[in-house]
Amino acid sequence: MNIHEYQAKEVLAKFGVPVPAGFAALTVDEAVEAAGKLPGPLYVVKAQIHAGGRGKGKFKELAPEAKGGVRLARTLDEVRAHATDMLGNTLVTIQTGEAGKQVNRLYVTDGVDIEKEFYLALLVDRATGRVAFVVSTEGGMDIETVAHDTPERIHTFDVDPATGFQPHHGRAVAKALGLTGDLAKQAQNVASKLYDAFIGTDAAQIEINPLAITGDNKLMVLDAKVGFDSNSLYRHKDLVQLRDETEEDPAEIEASKYDLAYIKLDGNIGCMVNGAGLAMATMDIIKLNGEFPANFLDVGGGANKEKVTAAFKIILSDPAVKGILVNIFGGIMRCDIIAEGIVAAAKEVSLSVPLVVRLEGTNVQQGKDILANSGLPIVPANDLGDAAKKIVAEVRSAA
């Protein structure tokens, strides 16, 4: 689960991380009021969407030369003008794609004199199973370019969970940033607090870009992107309240209600599979046969009629879907139970696109018999390769 920048800074501040003063706003008047609470004379008006690259982004509804989603203001009138430009309009960034995201919230913060910008992130290193620090002296809007062109400027190290964050980790951060003296001590403190926040919230990612040296020689977190491990949210009811469903795909929201793992893609063949690895293989083989998957959908190991029906409805809510491939390996699940769910779901949703089903595993023959005797135009497949060829052929013949 991702949250907005202003929410991320509120969470980090609770752990002692230094952030500038700021207030969220849902309307133009609220943005002006927020600026009035700040000392000034410089304000920063920031569009709040779940995507990076806002500073270089462009609004669809504004002239191409218009400023992006992060703007400086020196008067309350300028704050009002920037807020009017942003709210309700669509911001397109390198991370949103051409569709962009509508800006429904703003964040007005105190302006800061920036002497130097750094990059600092914490994430889970899947290879080691540890929290890793990613540090660079090249902070700012072009960090992706730095990673691509000069990867040697990015330093990484991980923290042993048995010991937790230690002083030498803080010194490693300060050294990677080239800081000495009091600034080195501040860097060690910030790194320690960020680690506490990462562990304390079961975060999946904390990205600080930039971490800046201000004009008064202080380290300050000027932008923060934070995401949490959704599997741990039952332990953090307060964090769940920060979820902004307007930033998420409606189909993904609906899928989460049934504990379905669903991600919309750009293809035309809907997929319903049990198991993430099998789902990935299914998508790959569809592409190998010349078409593209419309989604990733893992119904999990405990699928029942309700889950299968919900999965069908979610897949068919995408108008781009021209056919569905069901690929089930019945280990814990029984193929006959899955087959009954498929038949019931197909009847309930009045299935109008080709459906190819591959079943394998426990009670597979009973499952195949249920599908064959359903009276529905369900195309059986012997294996995954056969299933992919058949759904591609069905979709192309129906085009």
Image: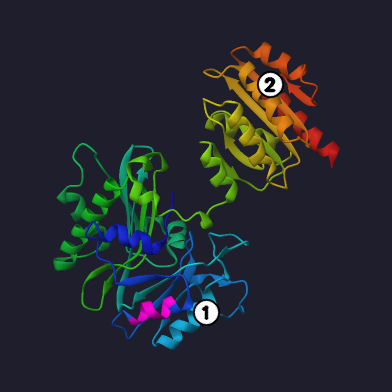
Residue drawn at (77%, 25%), measured in percent from left and top? 379
Amino acid under label 1?
Thr
Q: Which quadrant holds residue 79?
A: bottom left
On the rendered structure, is 241 left or right of 352? left
Relative height, residue 305 to residue 2 (above, below) = above
Q: Residue at x 31, y 48 (%)?
A: 201
The answer to whether mark 2 and mark 1 are in CB contact below 8 A is no
Q: Where does label 2 land, which residue?
A: 383
Q: Which residues are magenta?
A: 30-36
Q: Is residue 115 left or right of residue 84?
A: left
Colouring style:
rainbow
* Residue 263: mark: none
Amino acid marked by disc 2: Asp
For this view, does 258 lie left or right of residue 33? right
Query: Camera-side residue: 221 or 237?
Result: 237
Q: Around disc 1, counting alpha carbons within 10 Å, would you say few (fewer than 14), some (14 to 19), or many (20 or more)?
A: some
Q: Main secondary structure of the magenta part?
A: helix
Nearer to me, 358 or 309: 309
Q: Is residue 14 above or below residue 200?
A: below
**Which residue position is annotated with label 1?**
84
